[in-house]
Amino acid sequence: MQSYDIIVVGGGFLGLSTAYHLAGMGASVCLLEAGDLGSGTSATCSGRAQVSEGHLDDLNILLIREGLARFDGLQEELGMGFEWQRMPYLCLIRSQRLWDSWAERAAVLTPAGIPVELIGAEQLQREAPHLNMDGMLGAAVSLEGLLNPFRFCWAYAQAAHRNGVDLRPRTPVTAMQVTERGITAVQAGSEWLSAGAVAVMCGAWTPQVTAMAGADVPVHCTHAEAYITEPMPGLFHHTYGLADFYETIHGKERAVAIGFSPEPNGTLIITEAVTRSPDIHRGASFYGVTEISRELQRLFPVLAGARVVRSWGAPTAFTPDEEPVIGWLPTRNNLFVAASLVETITTVPLLGEWMATMLLGGEPPHSLAQFDPARFVEVTRK
């Protein structure tokens, strides 16, 4: 049986970045991915490195600020470009309550090193001349990042391979051997592999994998749909979203809330239609593309008639308290889990290194105790 220090399950942003850092720290690593590398939720996101929409506690703010700083020089470090750029984000505000809420957020984020400015309707119209201003009070403006998620995954994959990681795409985990000592072996295809620890980093598929070890991790998901348009260069120079985005979709059987970002070639990635689904899948629906288009044209009439090049769907993972799960499972002493990050892309360069440190028995520079999976184990035991 082939043996490794660490087996990483999941070939998206988290798995690839953690494997890269583990190997760089001298560990022998095997990464298992059921599909192609980066083919899960990582490949279906819009590529935004968000900065202003997350939780406002000290740890989340630190992860955003320091994670974003890691992108300076990251393309050179990984040896491959991933179209990284900084771009203003306009969070459109349509109610006084949300204006007040964003004023409070700005008062916390700006002194913490994440500048957020509120602009009124007149300035917003100058910044976004194609926007339908009906009902608009203004916007919260921040400077976030944007990248190509496919190239971001591939940059980490190539760097991990150079560091010696055994990358195994299209190799699903089908079983685990469990004893009192924890996970002793993982079945990947027809082969059994052993490791000192197993790290599960596969997003919405996390519960399916941890169940093989008899562990219940409460990661749930909704189904989100998006599409990309034909190139329309020169029309937009910001990323757009709605201040009422999350409350529009939260708890609904299906709903649409618009956000979009322009790619370097002028295409627009438009999100998102959300539906509840008992199954995890990547399908797109007539409802999704139709309702996204209808809402988009209400906000930006200039886009009427724009052609859709491709549409897709993907699961979006979340936990009961909407915080990530990062840490060792108390019921399985060598099984590590990381899933459901809020600002995933922004924090990947930082958390990949911190999680590699934890997997090798060390402590990260700042405690991640508030993300400990044990908080849910106690609840499920009751």
Image: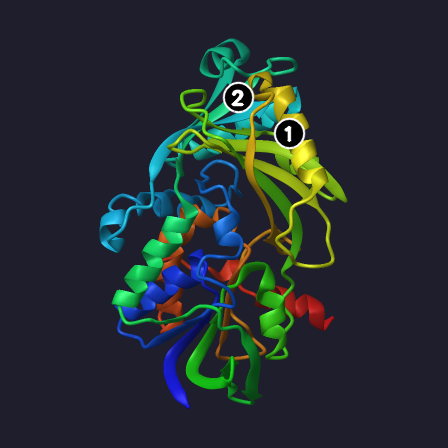
In three-dimensional space, the C-alpha distance between marks 2 and 1, rounded to whole angstroms, equals 22 Å
Residue on which disc 2 sits: 139
Residue 293: numbered disc: 1
Point out the frontmost of discs 2 and 1. Answer: 1
Q: Residue at x 46, y 39 (%)?
A: 50
Pointer 2: residues within 10 angstroms few (<14), some, or many (20+)?
many
Closer to the camera, 227 or 45? 227
State the quadrant of the C terminus: bottom right
Name the quadrant containing residue 154: bottom left
Closer to the camera, 256 or 39? 39
Closer to the camera, 99 or 85? 85
Give percent across and percent down for residue 64: 42, 44
In screen coordinates, is 120 left or right of 70? right
Q: Residue at x 46, y 25 (%)?
A: 232
Give percent across and percent down for residue 82: 33, 45
State the quadrant of the N terminus: bottom left
In screen coordinates, is 355 left or right of 377? left
In screen coordinates, is 360 left or right of 52? left
Closer to the camera, 73 or 39? 39
> Furthest-right residue in view?
253
Contact? badges 2 and 1 (CB < 8 Å):
no
